[in-house]
Image: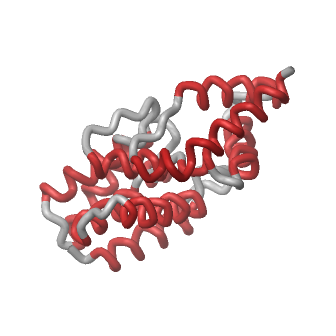
């Protein structure tokens, strides 16, 4: 498994080819999810081998946006399947990585511990201090796609999403749940 080479390959590709109008699903988001995976994975005491699979999935999880927003998780899996064999990943490892990627699809339905970690890392910001800054990037991106047009619509979407969302790992519940609930209260206040 040539993890370093696979990482450099996908990051270079994302930097060069991701559409510029993606203010949320950007290289910064991918790096953020990667760093959150590393932090949560350490706290959850996963093995070094599992960490490599997890971090590979983090780097590839939104690569499908290179081909479009629709069904981007499935496209991300295809990109992983097409490229990871070249970096010494086995078919079984690539299948596990695709399972991890699919665990980020909303609604999140992780089937194992590693999938729970990536699902939590993908939405880690919901319970962090940069929640509103990152949320603004997502609102901007959704506006570009014509999905939302007003801040009120956005706040309603956020309330519904935050109320329906839950973290899976003990680490993320401990680190992020309380702050996430504060953000929910703040967004609700904006709608009053």
Query: In what quadrant of the picture does the N terminus appear?
Result: bottom left
Q: Between residues 119 and 64, which one lies in front from this camera angle?
A: 119
Quarter holding residue 40:
bottom left
In the image, taking residue 145 as reference, residue 55 lies left or right, namely: left
Is residue 83 something one can see in this rendering? Answer: no
Q: Is 3 left, or right, of 61 in this rendering?
A: left
Residue at x-position 39% and y-position 46% = 169
- The reply, left or right, for residue 69 in relation to residue 169 is right
Q: Residue at x 19, y 50 (%)?
A: 95
Residue 132 position, x and y percent, is 75, 47
Residue furthest toward the top? 192
Compare residues 150 and 184 and report the one nearer the observer.
184
Q: Quadrant of the C terminus?
A: top right
Question: For the point 37% across and 45% down, which residue is it?
Answer: 75
- In the displayed structure, would residue 150 be above or below residue 26? above
Which of these two is toward me, 87 or 82? Answer: 87
Q: How is the image coloured?
A: secondary structure
**In the displayed structure image, the side of residue 55 where residue 18 appears, left or right:** right
Q: Is residue 147 above or below residue 84?
A: above
Q: Position of residue 34 (x, y in %)?
A: 46, 63
Please indicate, yes or no, whether residue 30 appears anywhere in the rendered image: yes
- Residue located 50% across and 58% down the image: 33
């Amino acid at each position: 498994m040539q993890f370093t080479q696979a990482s450099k390959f996908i990051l270079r590709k994302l930097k060069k080819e991701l559409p510029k109008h993606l203010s949320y699903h950007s290289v910064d988001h991918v790096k953020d999810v990667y760093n959150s995976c590393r932090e949560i994975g350490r706290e959850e005491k996963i093995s070094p081998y599992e960490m490599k699979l997890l971090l590979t999935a983090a780097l590839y999880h939104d690569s499908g946006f290179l081909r479009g927003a629709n069904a981007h998780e499935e496209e991300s899996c295809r990109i992983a399947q097409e490229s990871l064999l070249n970096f010494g990943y086995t078919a079984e490892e690539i299948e596990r990585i695709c399972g991890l990627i699919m665990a980020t699809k909303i609604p999140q339905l992780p089937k194992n511990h590693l999938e729970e970690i990536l699902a939590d890392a993908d939405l880690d910001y919901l319970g962090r201090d940069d929640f509103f800054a990152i949320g603004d990037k997502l609102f901007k991106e959704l506006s570009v796609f014509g999905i939302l047009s007003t801040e009120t619509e956005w706040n309603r979407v956020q309330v519904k999403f935050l109320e329906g969302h839950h973290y899976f790992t003990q680490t993320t519940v401990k680190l992020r749940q309380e702050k996430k609930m504060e953000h929910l209260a703040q967004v609700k206040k904006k709608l009053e």
